[in-house]
């Protein structure tokens, strides 16, 4: 079992302790057709499940430009797909747009992701 898998399990346990259940987030990534000018395909979406914990930013962190009132910080498991700015994240029936993503990777290997999300 990798350390990232162990942290994903810890996120699930923490979510259960906080809200009574582990939050499952659905990361929706848009896949663009090829870069060739002859590729006229349409974009498609892929869905990936992640374990998540959501927390509000403090009033001190909200600066009105990069972090807005109402933005949420999502701690996401690093098992599976990496979230990217512009992706969508659905948690608890609410859909958010991923604004920024910061990997927590003390040894160069992501253990979890801190994502700023916005409705």
Image (spheres, rainbow, N blue to C red):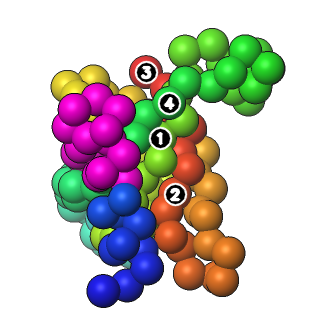
Residue 102: x percent and y percent?
Answer: 62, 56
Q: Are marks 2 and 3 in contact (CB under 8 Å)?
A: no
Label of residue 55 in the image: 4
Give the residue at x 43% y 79%. 3
Of tags 4 and 1, the one toward the viewer is 4
Label of residue 74 in the image: 1
Compared to 117, does 50 lie above or below? below
Give the residue at x 36% y 72%. 6
Q: What residue is shown with label 2?
A: 113
> Is 21 in the magenta?
yes
Q: Are marks 4 and 3 in contact (CB under 8 Å)?
A: no
Residue range corresponding to the magenta coloring? 11-27
Left or right of 65, for residue 82: left
Give the distance between the C-alpha atoms of the residues marked 4 and 2, in whole angstroms: 13 Å
Label of residue 119 in the image: 3
> Is 99 in the magenta?
no
Give the distance between the C-alpha atoms of the residues marked 2 and 1, in whole angstroms: 8 Å
Q: Residues within 10 Å of mark 3 (few under 14, many from 20)?
A: few
Label 1 secondary element: strand
Q: Is tag 2's residue or tag 3's residue first in the polypeptide sequence?
A: 2
Compared to 111, does 2 lie above or below? below
């Amino acid at each position: 079992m990798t350390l990232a898998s162990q942290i994903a399990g810890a996120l699930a346990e923490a979510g259960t302790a906080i809200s009574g259940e582990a939050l499952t987030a659905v990361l929706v990534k848009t896949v663009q057709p090829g870069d060739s000018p002859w590729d006229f395909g349409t974009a498609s979406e892929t869905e990936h499940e992640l374990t998540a914990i959501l927390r509000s930013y403090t009033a001190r962190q909200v600066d009105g430009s990069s972090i807005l009132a109402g933005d949420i910080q999502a701690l996401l498991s690093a098992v599976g797909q990496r979230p990217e700015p512009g992706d969508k994240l659905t948690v608890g029936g609410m859909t958010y747009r991923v604004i920024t993503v910061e990997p927590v990777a003390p040894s160069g290997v992501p253990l979890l992701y801190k994502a700023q999300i916005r409705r």
